[in-house]
Amino acid sequence: MWIDSHNHLQDRRLGDPAPIIAAMRLAGLEGCVVNATCEEDWENVANLARTEVDWVLPAFGIHPWKAHLPRAGWVDRLKDRLEMHPHASVGECGLDQWIAAPGLDIQKPIFDAQLRLAREMGRPVTIHCLKAWGALFEALTAAPPPSRFLLHSFNGSFETAQRLIPLGAFFSFSGYFLHQRKAAVVEVFKRLPLDRILLETDAPDMLPPPGIVSHPFDQDLNHPGNLSSIGQALASSLGIPVEELAQITRENARRFFGS
């Protein structure tokens, strides 16, 4: 049994989540963490958590691509939302210099506020970081991070991971990194401590290579049911039995999210 540590089941591109979830169950998943990307997402994510109790763990946050959208009072509303969902984490939030706008000057205050709230409320946080490692370390140095945080779809270097691990970092592997051109990412995961590795789909994005796709979907979108085949492929790359990786990543996810 597998746990998808990061997806976006609320994304309209996936359509009705009920058949998606049914397919995930049949594919050997026992749960998932659904991440919001903006305030408009929060209620949809909450509805999924209420409908799929003990199967969907919600995460509420503001994605760096949408850091220009929050309205006044958003931090208080996020706190209220987290208080309504005691098992929720903070996410998806972070920093991104791959995009031109919004810039880091807009992203950083939004990210800092979410880190602070996660720390104050004792919640784990899921971090998106793309081409912004220097800015991330500045943020984590300026104020202590929460006790555990997840670098989702981690594509940083092993040296970057070594700096993050003592701070409480976990790292999730996405099937997109099974493309041959991303082989360097797999090499990094071979060197990471097994007790810090999680698995994710980031569905409907981060589509794995065709040979890994067990659940084809419209318009080349990533179906979260692909997680099982992603796990099998990563286990082969790491040289460990599939059942062992499933158990390790499942236990890591439970420990990280407190589920």
Image (cartoon, rainbow, N blue to C red):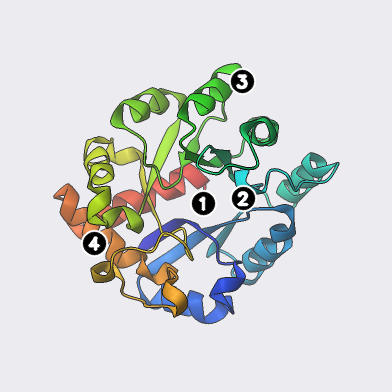
**Side (left or right) of 189 relative to 237:** right
Determine the image quadrant of residue 108: top right
At horizontal 55% and vertical 66% (from top left) the residue drawn is: 9
Chain-order first, disc 3 or disc 2: 2
**Side (left or right) of 158 relative to 25:** left
Camera-nearest residue between 52 and 35: 35
Can residue 124 be seen here? The reply is no
Q: Give the residue at mark 4.
A: 232
Determine contact: label 2, label 4, CB under 8 Å: no
- Outermost residue toward the bottom? 19
| Percent position of residue 242, x then y | 21, 59
Chain-order first, disc 2 or disc 1: 2
Tell me the kind of residue under disc 4: Gln
Q: Nearer the observer, disc 3 or disc 2? A: 3
- Outermost residue toward the front? 100
**Residues under labels 2 and 1: Cα distance?**
7 Å
At horizontal 73% and vertical 62% (from top left) the residue drawn is: 43
Q: Nearer the observer, disc 3 or disc 1? A: 3
Tell me the kind of residue under disc 1: Ser
At horizontal 46% and vertical 62% (from top left) the residue drawn is: 205
Q: Give the residue at mark 2.
A: 87
Q: Secondary structure at mark 3?
A: loop
Chain-order first, disc 3 or disc 1: 3
**Side (left or right) of 155 relative to 6:** left
Badge 1, how many Cα within 10 Å: few under 14, some, many 20+? few
